[in-house]
Image: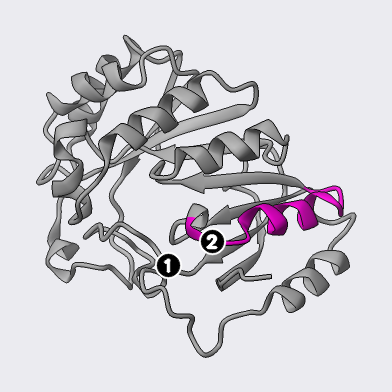
Amino acid sequence: MRFEIGGIKKTSLLDYPDVISAIVFTQGCNFNCGYCHNPSLLDFSSKKDAITVDVFFEFLKSRKGKLDGVVITGGEPTLQKDLTAFIEAIKSLNFLVKLDTNGTNPDIIIELLKNNLIDYIAMDIKAPIEKYSLITNTAVNTDNIIKSINTILNSNINYEFRTTVLPSLLSINDFEEIGKLINGAKKYYLQKFVVQSQINNNNLKDEKNYSDKDFNIIKETMCKYVKFVEIR
């Protein structure tokens, strides 16, 4: 099985709502966001200390009865050649699966949904469509972003959309366009930028968040389009 694991977190109570989960971090991403706090995962070549698939499944089998689910995040998981086979193996052990994605590979999302292989999906909405390349520092096929959004909106599983908010990259007015992009969504999170020990662009370490008042203004805007909006 070709599946590059960049690391794991053995237990999380936060990343999968109401589910005790393990987190698998996949190696490689097709975006290059400056605020990424997992820059070691951006490169497609595996780290020397990367965990093998066999070791991961040995761990997962040992956690049956203690964990309920697995979160597959990145990097960007949909870039993994054998993502479907990897998830099938997890599901065979009766674990729930949550997938985190940037939405660049909608056909893979469609395949996973068609085969009932994911139970929860979280998609990052980086910006209004016209700002995607600016935020991600790469050329983006925004038609694929829109297709992924619509696929998730019309799915029968639990899902969330979320945006990391940096004032230098996203204006308050940008959220009107983001709201239109995910109009009718069930759940959306505004994520405050938090400086990590590792960050892809060190120039952003001095970035200041919007005030609580500004975040509430953004939240009010998003509430016009989304049923549930929360600030993280």
173 left or right, relative to 146: left
Identity of the residue drawn at 25% across and 16% down: 221
Judged from this view, the residue extending furthest toward the top is 224
Q: Nearer the viewer, residue 132 or 122?
A: 132
224 left or right, relative to 62: left
Mark 2 lies on a secondary structure that is loop
Amino acid residing under circle 2? Gln
Res 201 → quadrant: bottom left
Q: Which mark is residue 28?
A: 1
85 left or right, relative to 23: right
| Image coordinates for residue 10, horizontal then vertical, percent | 68, 66
Which of the two marks, 1 or 2, is nearer to us in this view? 2
Within the magenta stretch, is there residue 85?
Answer: yes
Would you say the residues marked 1 and 2 are in contact, meaning their CB atoms lie under 8 Å apart?
yes
| Image coordinates for residue 86, horizontal then vertical, percent | 70, 59
Q: Which mark is residue 80?
A: 2
Q: Quadrant of the N terminus?
A: bottom right
Q: Which one is earlier in the sequence, the residue at label 1 or at label 2?
A: 1
Is any part of residue 122 visible from this angle?
A: yes
Q: Nearer the viewer, residue 24 or 18?
A: 24
Amino acid residing under circle 1? Gly
Residue stretch in magenta? 79-95
Distance between the alpha carbons at the discs numbered 1 and 2: 8 Å
Q: Is residue 232 above or below residue 33?
A: above
Badge 2 density bin: few <14, some 14–19, many ≥20, Cα 10 Å: some
Badge 1 density bin: few <14, some 14–19, many ≥20, Cα 10 Å: many
Identity of the residue drawn at 18% across and 36% down: 211
Within the magenta stretch, is there residue 128?
Answer: no
